[in-house]
Image (cartoon, grey):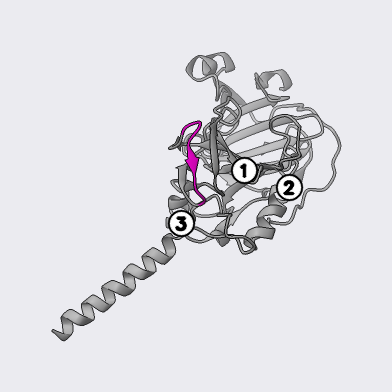
Amino acid sequence: MRQYVAHMKNWLIITVLVLTLAQPLVSQTSTEYVFPVDAADISRLTWTRDHWDGSNAVDIFFEHGTDLHDPDFQAFQDSRILAVTDGQVVRFDNERGGKALFIEADTGFRFYYAHLAEVYVATGDRVAAGQTIGRMGNTGRWTRYIEPHLHFEITSPRFRGGLFHSDVHAATWLKEHFGYGPEPARVTDYPASIPRGSPVRAPFRIMTTFEQAQEQNSDTAAITIRVVDEQQAVPVHSPLVGEIRVHRNPLFGMRVQITNRHLDETVVISGLQDIRVSTWDVVYTGDVLGYTADSVNIMYFRQGELTDPRVFF
């Protein structure tokens, strides 16, 4: 009997702990707000003070540099996305944001969610704060080749601007309501720059042309090059001046993105085996990004349009 009672006590304790962990994070300043990602440990999430495109949005990722087999990272990739407050849903799928929606809050604020893998609500549905509305993903033309994350924007009732130009600084809003701040913005100023020169300066062969890649998938069209001497690690150079983002992706491997925000020029190089840069570093044309002894995949976005990288080789 004592063993049974002890077993029941342990079961109750475990049940209480699980239920406690399953509760969404509620705002410290108002019970009407819930953190939009259902994460076991919010301290392991990261977002920046300033969005890469200069807007007031935030991209909520798992902490940088995490091992791909980390259980928390694996769970994050399949996280529930929650309604931040009570309101009405407006479904807003689009090429840029993928599976996306707005919550028109009862307070007049509008909350935009993008890149979801699944959406569980429809236009006109009423939702309550903390309700599951979707699942973490990376849908959308700009994000299919990077890690799952949530793009989150807020506009106030008085704002009359167009879409994707929110007037509420989301990182500040999250800090005020949930007590967690973004990683410090470490990007320094740098000159405008367009890509010039090949990222790989050792002899290479083009294995897949841009046209061939377009036929397979127009959203991830790129070129693939393979170094001739596969026994030797060769450096991969930055073809432009810009700021760095480092991501992992099961499709293309380790990925480095270089963005020059002055001209909206972005080069994405995937398949590196040894990364020598970090997110938010500023690099200049010719700087070494890392090394490869095999092949790399190169994508080029010119003012948001996917373009053949061979134009700058």
Question: CA separation, marks 3 and 2?
Answer: 28 Å
Is residue 64 shown to the viewer in this render? yes
Q: Which mark is residue 169?
A: 2
Q: Quadrant of the N terminus?
A: bottom left
Any part of residue 234 in sight: no
Answer whether residue 124 is magenta in the image.
yes
Q: Is residue 216 above or below residue 292?
A: above
Query: Quarter-wise, where is residue 46 in the image?
Result: bottom right
Q: SS at mark 2?
A: loop
Q: Quadrant of residue 87?
A: top right
Q: Position of residue 228 (x, y in %)?
A: 56, 28
Q: Give the residue number, with chain letter if any, for mark 3.
A: 72
Q: Residue at x 33, y 74 (%)?
A: 13
For the C terminus, the quadrant is: top right
Label 3 crowd (10 A; few <14 / some 14-19 / many >=20): some
Instruction: Work out whether 141 lies above or below 249.
Output: above
Mark found first going from the N terminus, 1 or 2: 1
Callout 2 amino acid:
His
Q: Residue at x 29, y 73 (%)?
A: 12
Q: Going from the N terminus, do you reach mark 3 or mark 1 first? A: 3
* 9 up-or-down from 197: above or below: below
Tell me, for residue 152, which label it has, or none.
1
